[in-house]
Structure formats: structure tokens, C-alpha cells
């Protein structure tokens, strides 16, 4: 009886651990600069070992209510580096590590990867096959393009060992800066489990380090003192 009760307790603890798992944030990691361009890998971060992203949606521009058309592509549709031709489809990435903008719900790149990420209708008639992200009115969190895993049983969107799911790569000019809002739908990776939702922002571009911000503030104080 004690063994049975102990087992039941372990099961309950396990279920509680799964149910408490949640989305925590987005993070953008620079992949370096080349030819005046910088590429960023963007991840959704979770705190559950089996958390599985299902879709990302309502991506939008949060940067001072201005339009942004600065994404670069170098894929099977762009005919070299281009801001006017290209696709966000991860299967159309030509080589690993390409300087290309694409989105995904985890998985790999290239035709051989079989990545099952697809654009939802909010991308427009062209779907993924558009060079720039079709943002709606800036700072509107109720609408915006999205993408989803069209084959959820493959668990393509499950977190890696670091609790992250790659949601895309974005290539922009070195001097560019944009903050984007994005929502995510996910579950605990068990078939039929409840879908949960999270949201947050991430920034691509040059952000002063904390030390640099402090120095700028100090410089401002010195300037004010000199004027007094």
C-alpha cells in the first residue's frame, strides 16, 4: 500500500511539474556580421522539459509606429541577396548557415529537412513567398502574420536541451533596429493536452550594453554640470 501511495504521489508530482511549465520569453542571438549585414537567430524560451510550440502568430512592429522593410533573403527564390525577392519558407534555405531570413516552428532548414512549418492566411495570398514581413498597423497586437507546424505529431516544435525552440532567423543591415511583438501557442507535448498561449517582444539591432548606458548617463550629468 505504501509503495502504491508513493507511486501515486510521484505521478501527481510529475503532472504538477508538467502543468506548471510555461513560456517565459523570447531571445535574439546575433550570428555575426558580414558585408554590412547582421543575422539573428530568435528563440522562444520555456521552462518545461517537454514544452512544444505549435504556432507563432500576430507578429508586429513595435518600433515607434514606423514601417520596416529591411529584411534580407538569400534563398531558392531570391536569386542572390535581395530585399525584394525571397521567401520565409525554411525549406527554401539553400545551405546551412545561409544569410537568409526565414521563420519556423523548430526543425531544420533546406528541402531535405522536411520542415513542416507553414504560413497561416494572415501572411496574405503569397504565403511565405514574400520578401518583407506583411506587418499590420504598428503596435496592434490583435492581428498580424503567423506560422504553424502543419504536422504537430512530429513534435518538431519541442524544446531543445536548453528549453528553447528556434522560431526564425532574421537578416538585417548592421545599423537597423526593430522590436517585434509575437504570440505563441504551445502545449506540454502530449497528444490532446491543453493549448496554452504566451506573448512577448524581441529586438534586432544595436542595443547599448548596460555599461554603455551608464556611461551615456554619466556623460549627460557632466554636460549638465558644465552648463550650470
Image (cartoon, grey):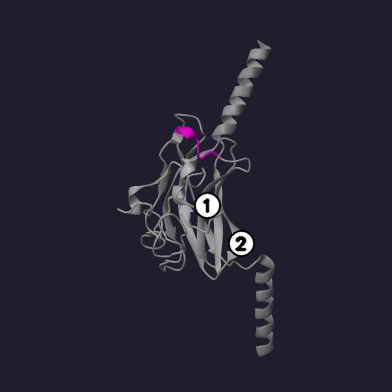
What percent of the width, then of the height, locates residue 179?
A: 50, 62
Q: Label 2, secondary structure: give it.
A: strand
What percent of the width, then of the height, locates residue 6?
A: 66, 18
Residue lying farthest to the front in this orientation: 79
Could you tell me which residue is drawn at 35 percent across and 53 percent down? 123
On screen, residue 17 versus residue 52, left or right, reads: right
Main SS type for the magenta part?
Answer: loop
- Residue under numbered circle 1: 95
Could you tell me which residue is drawn at 46 percent across and 49 percent down? 90
Indicate the quadrant containing the N terminus: top left, top right, bottom left or bottom right: top right
Res. 117 image quadrant: top left
What percent of the width, then of the height, locates residue 209?
A: 65, 66
- Is residue 101 one of those drawn in magenta? no
Q: Label 1, secondary structure: give it.
A: loop
Magenta-tinted stretch: 153-158
What percent of the width, then of the height, locates residue 55?
A: 44, 44
Could you tell me which residue is drawn at 56 percent across and 64 percent down? 38
- Residue 194 visible, this angle: no
10 Å crowding of disc 1: few (<14), some (14-19), many (20+): few
- Residue under numbered circle 2: 32
Mark 1 and mark 2: Cα distance apart in space: 17 Å
**Lower sequence index among marks 1 and 2:** 2
The reply to whether dot 1 and dot 2 touch (C-beta < 8 Å) is no
Indicate the quadrant containing the C terminus: top left, top right, bottom left or bottom right: bottom right
> Along the line of sight, which residue is nearer the eye, 113 or 19?
113
Amino acid at each position: 500500500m505504501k509503495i502504491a501511495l508513493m507511486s501515486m504521489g510521484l505521478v501527481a508530482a510529475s503532472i504538477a511539474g508538467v502543468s506548471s511549465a510555461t513560456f517565459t520569453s523570447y531571445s535574439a542571438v546575433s550570428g555575426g556580421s558580414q558585408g554590412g549585414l547582421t543575422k539573428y537567430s530568435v528563440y522562444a524560451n520555456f521552462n518545461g522539459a517537454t514544452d512544444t510550440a505549435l504556432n507563432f502568430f500576430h507578429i508586429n512592429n513595435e518600433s515607434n509606429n514606423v514601417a520596416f522593410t529591411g529584411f534580407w533573403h538569400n534563398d531558392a527564390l531570391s536569386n542572390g541577396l535581395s530585399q525584394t525577392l525571397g521567401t520565409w519558407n525554411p525549406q527554401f534555405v539553400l545551405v546551412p548557415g545561409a544569410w537568409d531570413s526565414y521563420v519556423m516552428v523548430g526543425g531544420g532548414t533546406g528541402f531535405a529537412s522536411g520542415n513542416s512549418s507553414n504560413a497561416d492566411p494572415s501572411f496574405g495570398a503569397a504565403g511565405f513567398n514574400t520578401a518583407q514581413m506583411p506587418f499590420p498597423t504598428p503596435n496592434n497586437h490583435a492581428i498580424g502574420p503567423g506560422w504553424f507546424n502543419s504536422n504537430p505529431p512530429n513534435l518538431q516544435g519541442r524544446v531543445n536541451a536548453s528549453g528553447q525552440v528556434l522560431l526564425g532567423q532574421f537578416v538585417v543591415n548592421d545599423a537597423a533596429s526593430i522590436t517585434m511583438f509575437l504570440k505563441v501557442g504551445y502545449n506540454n507535448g502530449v497528444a490532446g493536452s491543453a493549448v496554452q498561449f504566451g506573448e512577448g517582444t524581441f529586438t534586432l539591432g544595436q542595443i547599448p550594453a548596460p555599461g554603455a548606458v551608464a556611461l551615456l548617463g554619466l556623460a549627460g550629468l557632466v554636460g549638465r554640470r558644465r552648463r550650470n
